C-alpha cells in the first residue's frame, strides 16, 4: 500500500506544481506621486508568461494641473511590455490616459520595482497624442509578494495525504 501512496502523491504534486509556475501576480501601486501634487494607488495583475495585464484598479487624485481619474477594468494598449503599460478607460479622444514605465521588467517572482515614469494626460484624437498637458510621475513603485510555489506544493501534499488517510479508514 505504501507504493500506491507514493505514486498518487507524485502524480498529485506534478499536476499541482505545473499549474503553479504559470500563476499571474497581483502588483500594488504604492506612493505614486505626480509633479502637480496629485497621487495614485491601486493594483493590477501581471502574467509574466503571457505578458498581459488584467484586473487593473488604479485611482489617481487631483493635483494643480489635472483632476485625476479611475482606471478600473481598462484597456491596455497593444505593444506593451513588462517594462511599461498604458492604461485607458477607452481609446477615445477626451478620456484620461495613465502611462506607467517601470525601472525593471516585472516578473512572476514579485518584489519591488520603481516606477520611473511616465505621465497622466487626456487622450487626443485616436490617442496618438495627448490633448492638453501631461502631469509627469515624480516617484512611485510597484510591489508584489507572490505565494511561493513551495507553499502550494506543501498544501497539495497535505490534502493528498488527508485524502489517502480517509480512504484507508473507510
Image (cartoon, rainbow, N blue to C red):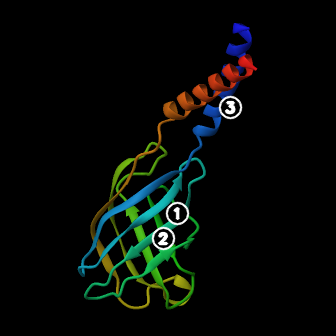
Between 16 and 100, which is closer to the camera in this rendering?
16
Q: CA distance from mark 3 to mark 2?
A: 35 Å
Q: Residue at x 48, y 70 (%)?
A: 86
Between 129 and 56, which is closer to the camera in this rendering?
56
Give whichever of discs 2 and 1 has the lower sequence position. 1
Q: Which mark is residue 80?
A: 1
Percent position of residue 135, x then y: 32, 81
Percent position of residue 20, x then y: 59, 38
| Secondary element at image label 2 | strand
| Residue 40 position (above or below residue 67) | above
Q: State left or right for residue 95 relative to residue 111.
A: right
Which mark lies nearer to you, 3 or 2? 3
Between 90 and 28, which is closer to the camera in this rendering?
28
Image quarter of residue 165: top right
Q: Which mark is residue 86?
A: 2
Residue located beneath label 3 in the image: 15
Give whichever of discs 3 and 2 has the lower sequence position. 3
Say which quadrant the N terminus sits in: top right
| Secondary element at image label 1 | loop
Image quarter of residue 12: top right
Amino acid at each position: 500500500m505504501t507504493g500506491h501512496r507514493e505514486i498518487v502523491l507524485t502524480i498529485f504534486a506534478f499536476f499541482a506544481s505545473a499549474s503553479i509556475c504559470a500563476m499571474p501576480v497581483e502588483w500594488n501601486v504604492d506612493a505614486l506621486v505626480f509633479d502637480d501634487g496629485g497621487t495614485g494607488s491601486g493594483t493590477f495583475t501581471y502574467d509574466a508568461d503571457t505578458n498581459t495585464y488584467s484586473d487593473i484598479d488604479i485611482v489617481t487624485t487631483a493635483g494643480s494641473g489635472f483632476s485625476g481619474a479611475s482606471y478600473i477594468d481598462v484597456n491596455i494598449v497593444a505593444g506593451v511590455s513588462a517594462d511599461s503599460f498604458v492604461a485607458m478607460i477607452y481609446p477615445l479622444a477626451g478620456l484620461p490616459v495613465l502611462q506607467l514605465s517601470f525601472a525593471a521588467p516585472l516578473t512572476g517572482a514579485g518584489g519591488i520595482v520603481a516606477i520611473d515614469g511616465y505621465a497622466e494626460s487626456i487622450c487626443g484624437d485616436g490617442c496618438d497624442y495627448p490633448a492638453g498637458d501631461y502631469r509627469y510621475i515624480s516617484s512611485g513603485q510597484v510591489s508584489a509578494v507572490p505565494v511561493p510555489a513551495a507553499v502550494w506544493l506543501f498544501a497539495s501534499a497535505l490534502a493528498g495525504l488527508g485524502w489517502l488517510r480517509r480512504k484507508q479508514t473507510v
